[in-house]
Image: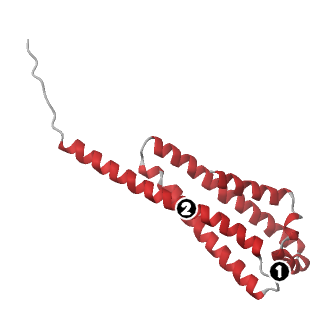
Amino acid sequence: MLICLLGIAVGILLLLYIDWHEQSVLYRQFLTYLRRANPTLYWLCYRIAASAWCIFHFIHLASIIMTIFGVQVTKMCLIIPQMVVLALHIGVYVLMSFSITLLSITGAKFMWMSLTIVIFFAVFTTSNLILMVLYHRFLDEKNKALKNLLGNTRTVHFKETN
């Protein structure tokens, strides 16, 4: 949950302080040309990307809250949305890391900071997904054992005497 809040905070900071991204190597090597070519389109795409980052992590936060509720009532169906969101997050982080690596190879400087941020979020998301899958398996085995136990019990009927 802390990583989610950190991701939302980073997105909000990038929306509020739009000049911060100009300090990055990614901006200096590649995005400067796009900004000079069409500034209005550049700022529109920048705001959409920063907003998508915030929404991305907000959806994850909502799925965490749903998972906490699912854990309390031991419902497996409430855990699955977070696993789907985490799998999508990992896919996006893999694409981001490959694209940053490709841009680093073709550019003049290697973009350590951008790649470090993506890998930081990817590591915690991957560990979260591993723990969610393990908990899902544990809850599934627990529910199967409980159904098996309840299926083997016998009911006792008492006769009413007058």
Number of numbered markers: 2
Mark 1 nearby-residue class (10 Å; few <14, some 14–19, many ≥20): few
- Viewer-closest of 12 and 41: 12
Kind of residue indicated by mark 1: Phe
Q: Dot 2 corresponds to which residue?
A: 127
Would you identify the image quadrant in which residue 7 lies?
bottom right
Q: Is residue 104 left or right of residue 155?
A: right
Query: Residue shown at 84%/77% (left/top)?
Result: 31
Q: Is residue 128 above or below residue 96?
A: above
Closer to us: mark 1 or mark 2? 2
Residue that extends furthest to the right in the rendered view of this protein: 36
User: At numbered mark 1, what does the secondary structure look like: helix, strand or loop?
Assistant: helix
User: At numbered mark 2, what does the secondary structure look like: helix, strand or loop?
Assistant: helix
- Viewer-closest of 43 and 151: 151
Would you identify the image quadrant in which residue 134 lies?
bottom left
Residue that extends furthest to the bottom in the rendered view of this protein: 106
Q: Is residue 115 above or below residue 52?
A: below
Query: Residue shown at 49%/57% (left/top)?
Result: 131
- Looking at the image, tell me whether mark 1 or mark 2 is earlier in sequence order: 1
Query: Residue shown at 8%/11% (left/top)?
Result: 162
Q: What's the distance in space between the residues labelled 1 and 2, CA to CA?
A: 32 Å
Q: Is residue 158 above or below residue 151?
A: above
Residue 48, x across and y down, in percent? 76, 64
Residue 20, x across and y down, in percent? 87, 64
Q: Dot 1 corresponds to which residue?
A: 30
Residue 36, x across and y down, in percent? 91, 78
